[in-house]
Image (cartoon, coloured by chain):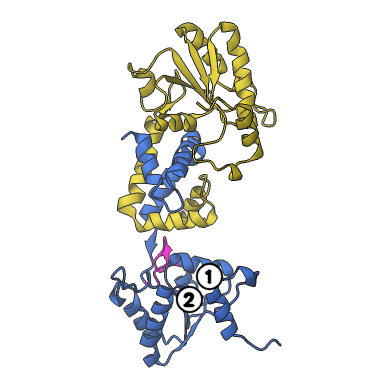
Chain colours: A yellow, B blue
Amino acid sequence: MTELERLIALLAKLPGLGPRSARRAALHLIERREQLLRPLAAALTEADRRVRACSTCGNLDTADPCGICADPSREPLSLCVVEDVRDLWALERSGAFRGRYHVLGGTLSALDGRGPEALRIGELLERVKSLGITEVILAMNATVEGQTTAHYVAERLEPGGVRVTRLAQGVPLGGELDYLDDGTLKTALRARRPAT
Amino acid sequence: MTELERLIALLAKLPGLGPRSARRAALHLIERREQLLRPLAAALTEADRRVRACSTCGNLDTADPCGICADPSREPLSLCVVEDVRDLWALERSGAFRGRYHVLGGTLSALDGRGPEALRIGELLERVKSLGITEVILAMNATVEGQTTAHYVAERLEPGGVRVTRLAQGVPLGGELDYLDDGTLKTALRARRPAT
């Protein structure tokens, strides 16, 4: 295997890149050594060296505790539980949440043999208890696994007396009814609210 | 900008990756340091260090002349002219051509101000003349720029008396007429051939 073939094979392992786009990406990189290839090699090495999971919340950052956990302006008593860092970033981009996070590191999955001990649920219970958290928002994905996990986490939290909420489900902003799946429509109809 | 943001910004510059898939790719890499992140960083550095354009044909390889130019089993008198290395690779994958290549390095483009001197056309004429090439196959893309370039190259080669051919155009294998654009259908109809 040549250097180019090895590079292409590795690029093809990235989500979103198949064999064809990996070939295009490799050529793109070779044609832009100064502007892209070398900076990317350096950024990978730097990320490897410096990025760590926050030991408090599981977020990825170069500092531990991470920037969010260390930010004194964030509400300390409201925790948002997410499946992974991707979801944390999505919520941060929305700017709608000013508390702190707890990254579970995945979902429960009977199929993949992932039980509660594989997720950071014990750490969550511990954190809620020791910090006197007042509200836990379960922000799992609206998938079967996500909702199963949310249900499990809610049951574990309940005895502690903390307020446990979850994201509303319904028609997304800009959503056209004709294009929505039946499940979303049913959920939105069942959870209908006063119009004024 | 943090290390992660820099990595994501660079990944997003790869063709085929947008901001969202670059974020996913960055997380994918961080979660697979041993298997993917470090090997990719190493492969980029190795490719940077060792991959060069072949001074004869323009192919990318660690050797110069490249593996194809140096292969004595390839027909020496048949040259296939392509726009870029991507196209050379596509033809090699097909296994249909056993001669050698000449990579132009792009197409003529009035819009982008790319004239003949920006392409390796002089080198092509020189190679055809000095090696006594008997056939030049123009394998440009079936785009306006590709065909303009093919036309220009053919005109420059003609005085030398070499046989100049181009790829056939028509219905692609597995192509359903109903899904083909009008241009392809017209071309295929005009270039129709005896059925037996």
Q: Residue at x 56, y 14 (%)?
A: A122
Q: Residue at x 50, y 11 (%)?
A: A128
Which residue matches tag 1?
A: B91
Q: Residue at x 47, y 72 (%)?
A: B141
Can residue A87 be seen from the camera position used here? yes
Which amino acid does the dot numbered 1 rest on?
A: Leu
Question: Which of the labelled discs sits on residue B139, or is there none?
Answer: 2
Q: Quadrant of residue A95?
A: top left
Q: Is residue A66 magenta?
A: no
Q: Position of residue A69 (x, y in %)?
A: 39, 19
Q: Is residue A152 left or right of residue A29?
A: right
Q: Quadrant of residue B149?
A: bottom left
Whether A161 is drawn above or below B129: the answer is: above
Element at label 2: loop
Q: Give the foreground label among 2 and 1.
A: 2
Q: Is residue A38 left or right of residue B168?
A: left
Whether B190 is drawn above or below A36: the answer is: below
Q: Is residue B63 magenta?
A: yes
Q: Chain of mark 1?
A: B
Question: Which of the labelled discs sits on residue B28, or is there none?
Answer: none
User: Which of these two is toward me, B44 or B16?
Assistant: B16
Q: Position of residue B193 (x, y in %)?
A: 63, 87
Which amino acid does the dot numbered 2 rest on?
A: Ala
* Main secondary structure along the magenta-highlighted residues: loop
Label 1 neighbour load within 10 Å: few <14, some 14-19, many 20+: some
Q: Is residue A90 left or right of residue B110?
A: right
Q: Real-space Cα distance between discs 2 and 1?
A: 9 Å
Residue found farthest to the front:
A196
- Please state the extent of the stretch shown in magenta in the rendering: B56-66
Q: Earlier in the sequence, mark 2 or mark 1?
A: 1
Contact (Cβ within 8 Å) of mark 2 with mark 1: yes
